[in-house]
Image (spheres, helix red, strand yellow):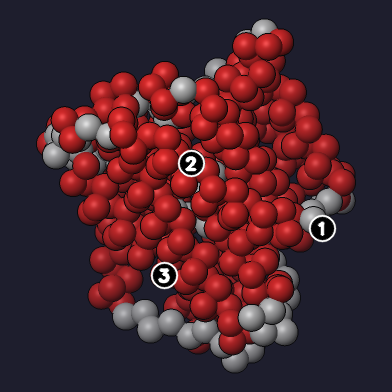
Amino acid sequence: MSKNYFHAVATLIGTIIGVGIFAIPYVISKSGIILLFVYLPLLGIVQYFLHKLYAEIILSTKERHRLPGYAEKYFGKSGKKITLVLVLIGNYGGLLAYIIVGGIFLQQLLGPYFGGNVFFYSTALFILEAAAVLMGMKLLASAELIMVGLLLLMVALITWRGWGYVNLDNYSLIDWSNVFLPYGPIFFAVGGEAAIPSVCRLLARQKEKIKSAICWGTFIPVAVMLFFTVLAVGITGNNTTPDTLAGLNSIIGNGVVVFALIFGLLAIITSFLVLAQAVKEVYWWDLGMNKKLAWGLSCIVPYFLYLIGFQNLIKVISLTGAVVGGVLGIVVICLVFKVKRKKELAPIISNNLSKPFAYFLSLLFILGLIYEIWAVLR
């Protein structure tokens, strides 16, 4: 396998492994361990299918776009406007989640030595990330490859240090009052659409390997999240915190958790960079803005949302995953049907998408959207 293949897989893994892996244990501790084995594999398969659909759209079109640009090409300006709003809301929700958790992790790591509150650390980290987005992304693929190794090391260390603390009594089987709670966070956690254009670019000369890269890049994070969640909930039980690591820190001690915090920060930083670059490219490629203005809009808006009080991690990722992610899933499905009739290039990836299955997925997304809106408003 070529270096670009491993970079492509690592880019997708690094995009998926971000805030989501640290939020899943909390919602599973509230809803029951059985639901982990229902939602995570099923939604992983759904996201894998959506990733392949997006790749087919990219590979069937000559011009380089992000999703709003493809919507304009195949559905006209009204399609572009709707998709643009959804993409920006979804990506800004993801960036906001990274700002929230990044500040929490950095404060836990440096606060005992230097003091300062979470807001200070969130702001400091955001400034560094925004500067990195401005300077460019040339080293990101290599950084993601290193991140995959650190991810496996983190899980191994927590397993080694925490296995003796796992208690079967910490697992609740299922809480029917929270049976739909994991949907939004898990759907958010396993989504990596922002990285698919990068995967296709990295493998532009090896297009036949794109499907394999998407498969490994999607399901390795699913397997890691499954194992990590079972382990974390088994250790912390009802004391599982929304960011997971604070709860683990109180039980298994500082040594391993310090490494986990460092890894968590690196994962969040790299995911922030990929997502911010995706938003920047929407403004740059699809709206024709200059690079600096595109950079400013991609970074400043989520920080402004953080400033005005959007700081509840679980609500942010639940709404982003179920509401925006679900609707964008419907957009991708609709685009694929259009692309298959008007494709400009013969794509390496051609998905079999029947209308009944498309209707089923769309219904799933709509029901998830309705539940999350109801859950927030109740």
Residue that carries the numbered disc 1 in the rendered image:
138
- What is the quadrant of residue 196 in the picture? bottom right
Q: Circle 3 — which element?
A: helix
Mark with earlier residue (2, 1): 1
Q: Nearer the viewer, residue 73 or 185?
A: 185
Disc 3 and disc 2 in contact, CB within 8 angstroms: no
Q: Nearer the viewer, residue 253 or 23?
A: 253
Q: Circle 1 — which element?
A: loop
Q: Residues within 10 Å of mark 1 (few under 14, many from 20)?
A: few
Residue that carries the numbered disc 3 in the rendered image:
49
- Give the alpha-carbon distance from disc 3 to disc 2, as whole Å: 32 Å
- What is the quadrant of residue 303 in the picture? top right
Disc 1 and disc 3 in contact, CB within 8 angstroms: no
Q: Residue, x 35% and y 50% (percent of image)?
A: 226
Q: Circle 2 — which element?
A: helix
Residue 102 higher or lower than 40, as above or below: above
Q: Residue, x 59% and y 91% (percent of image)?
A: 346
* In-image side of 340 versus 179 (left or right): right
Q: Closer to the camera: disc 3 or disc 2?
A: 2
- Give the alpha-carbon distance from disc 1 to disc 3, as whole Å: 28 Å
- What is the quadrant of residue 159 in the picture? top left
Mark with earlier residue (1, 3): 3
Residue 366 higher or lower than 74, as above or below: above
> What amino acid is labelled 2 in the image?
Leu
Residue that carries the numbered disc 2 in the rendered image:
157
> What amino acid is labelled 3 in the image?
Phe
